[in-house]
Image (cartoon, rainbow, N blue to C red):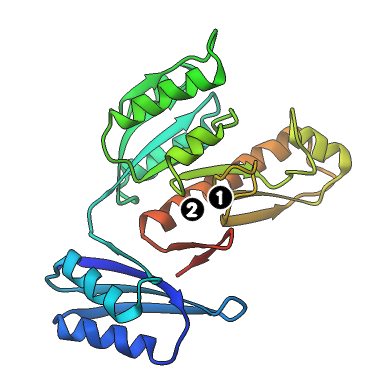
Amino acid sequence: MQLHHVLIDTFDAKGLVYKISELFFRHNLNIQSNSEYVDREHNKFFMRSEIAGEINPKLLHEELQLLLGEKANIRIFSPLKKRIVLLVTKESHCLGDILIRYEAGELNAQILGVISNYETLKPLVDKFDIPFIHIGHENLSREAHESAIISAIQKMGEVDYIVLAKYMRILTSVFVETFPEKILNIHHSFLPAFVGANPYKQAFERGVKIIGATAHFVNNHLDEGPIITQNIINVDHSYSWKEMQHSGRDVEKIVLSSALKLVIENRVFVHANKTVIL
């Protein structure tokens, strides 16, 4: 029997879990798992349910909306694979990790294509029989280049998520607003302390003791979007900056793949420029 995910966020009130569960029962649905969280500061209630049974998504949504009020945000997800697009530049570690997990069946997703402003990674992508689209930025304004990328993505049909797997160009507000809360990015956690070229060398020169990475949704504030996952590792004086860079890239690919898995599994709520993971 197929599982569906129901995600609800609304203002907190007594009896919400009972009311929602009772409605599922009336629809002859079985709750396989359930997670809730209350943000007391904002009086917000979050709930993620995995339900099994035959459902009419439109009818269930309408009844939940009637039960909880028009201000409740209700999302119902089918078991269909998420449709994702990867954007890359020249670095292969994050892309390669996602492609290997994809090939191994670890991601409930369909990779529609990989788009890059360089052709460097085409041989890698070709090995996985995934379309590679080169859209060079030479002699193009940023707006014209992004317009070509947006057009290429839209030709792929409905897209659930766009993953910036070390895509090293800053996106304009037009691009971000075209795909709201659908763009995932990864960066080293030295930002904003070590910005610009070669942050690992800068970190080495400052004698840092931990390095890490952050995966987040992209908004119009550079590297300030809602954080999905983070991780760190310890380093010390014995690391060269090259060794620090290698360790940092290991963290980056794990953190990005973890974030991608969470959104694919419909576990992420965005709330007040933060995320709630259930």
Please determine whether, in this image, residue 259 is positioned above or below residue 156: below
Which residue is pictured at 62% across the width and 42% down the height? 187
Estimate the spatial distance between the alpha carbons at disc 2 and disc 1, rounded to whole Å. Answer: 8 Å
Identify residue type, mark 1: His
Measured as percent of width and height from the top left, residue 21 is found at 28, 85
Asked whether the viewer can see residue 161, the reply is yes
Would you call the spot at circle 2 few (<14 residues within 10 Å), some (14-19), or many (20 or more)? many
Which residue is pictured at 54% across the width and 31% down the height? 167
Q: Quadrant of the N terminus?
A: bottom left
Asked whether the viewer can see residue 117, the reply is no
Query: Residue lying farthest right?
Result: 206
Q: Are marks 2 and 1 in contact (CB under 8 Å)?
A: yes
Please determine whether, in this image, residue 250 is positioned above or below residue 271: above
Please determine whether, in this image, residue 16 is positioned above or below residue 238: below
Would you call the spot at circle 1 few (<14 residues within 10 Å), some (14-19), or many (20 or more)? many
Depth check, front residue: 103 or 145: 145
Identify residue type, mark 2: Ala
Left or right position of 144 against 110: right
Please determine whether, in this image, residue 137 is positioned above or below residue 102: above
Q: Quadrant of residue 35?
A: bottom left
Q: How many marks?
A: 2
Depth check, front residue: 198 or 112: 112
Measured as percent of width and height from the top left, residue 273 is found at 59, 58
State which tag comes first along the sequence, 2 or 1: 1
Q: Dot 2 corresponds to which residue?
A: 259
Which residue is pictured at 34% across the width and 51% down the height? 106
Which residue is pictured at 31% across the width and 88% down the height? 19
Measured as percent of width and height from the top left, residue 185 is found at 54, 42
- Numbered circle sitting on residue 216: 1
Q: Quadrant of residue 30?
A: bottom left
Left or right position of 61 against 267: left
